[in-house]
Amino acid sequence: MKQAQILEALSVFQLDFTIWSGMTKLSISDLKLGEGGDIPPERLALLGRKRICNPDLLKHFNSLKRRAIRTCEKYGLNFLNGYAVPTAKEDQLAQELDVICDEFEDNKQLFLSDYDASLEAWIHENQNYAAAIQSSIMPKEQVAKRLFSGYQLFKIQPSSDASSKRLEQGVDQLGDDLISEVIREADDLYQNLVGKDECHTRMSNKLAVLCDKIDGLSFLHGAILPIVSLMRDVLREVECLDGHKIMGNTFHKLMSLLLLLSDRHRIEQFARGEVSAQAFSTPLPTQPKTQLDDMDAFFAAQSTSENFQAESSYF
């Protein structure tokens, strides 16, 4: 796919979350030094700053920000200080982010409505440092400006030949980043299953999420469509199982799939048709991957002359 077509197929989301720290600078007058003095507890002061608000009341705002990041990562890849996602998925992602932002705003209004009372409770909890807290209390109106959630959505268009070249390099890197994510996620799953001969069906949930993500971004790299097809086959077999255990031949197929996906060279071999899907019906050796002499030889041994040949602009 040409660069112009790729850019047309991508949208970029940039998250915009501002979360008040509830802290301000710790001054010399806040410290009780000398004979009979003491150091403020860590819950109140940390690295030259003091908390003028109970930190527990701000945790949910940070949780919502992390949830927004995970939601973007579910659909896209880091790009231009944001997340490149398939344009076909932008409405779906926007709806999920809107839910998070609405929850953020609801929590903000609740926090502000209880702001004065929460300050009094914090001062009461730290009576020995009441003066230090009271001297730095921030008006509610200023706090309101420091609690914000939102996002921007935009398309990318190079403004010159020079910027077009740099952008092309960035887009090419996205394809490599996508393969790297596949390798990382597959290896994590594989390492969790090494030495076992069965697992719960929920282990396939992460694989299903990854499959949906890379399917949407398959235009970034020629190796993606072949492995998506293979992942779908294994996931369909898992869905047809009775009960909640993956075992026997299905478990061996899952492990073989994860082993292939956890290595860039084997992914490229499969995309070029040098490794056949027959490898996924052959039981794997039981040793951990790091102890096997030559896993590439295992997959190569399963090759046939009728292998699937991937259509790829990359290979």
Image (tube, rainbow, N blue to C red):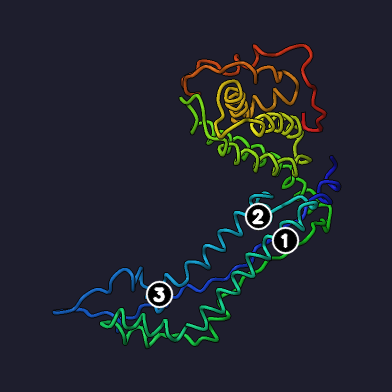
Label whose residue precedes the other's in the sequence (2 or 1):
2
Q: Relative to 10, is 19 above or below?
A: below
CA separation, marks 1 and 3? 32 Å
Classify mark 2: helix, strand or loop. Answer: helix
Please give the residue where the numbered disc 3 appears in the rendered image.
Answer: 54
Q: CA distance from mark 3 to mark 2?
A: 30 Å
Mark 1 or mark 3, which has the lower sequence index? 3
Closer-to-camera residue (31/128)? 128
| Crowd rating for badge 2 (residues with CA inside 10 Å; few <14, some 14–19, many 20+) | many
Q: Looking at numbered disc 3 in the image, what kind of residue is underneath it?
A: Asn
Question: Mark 1 highlights which residue?
Answer: 94
Residue tagged 2: 72
Q: Could you say where residue 32 lies in the image, as x and y percent from the top left?
A: 23, 80
Q: Nearer the viewer, residue 141 or 268?
A: 141
Specify the amino acid type for callout 2: Cys
Q: Secondary structure at mark 1?
A: helix
Of mark 3 and mark 2, the one earlier in the sequence is 3
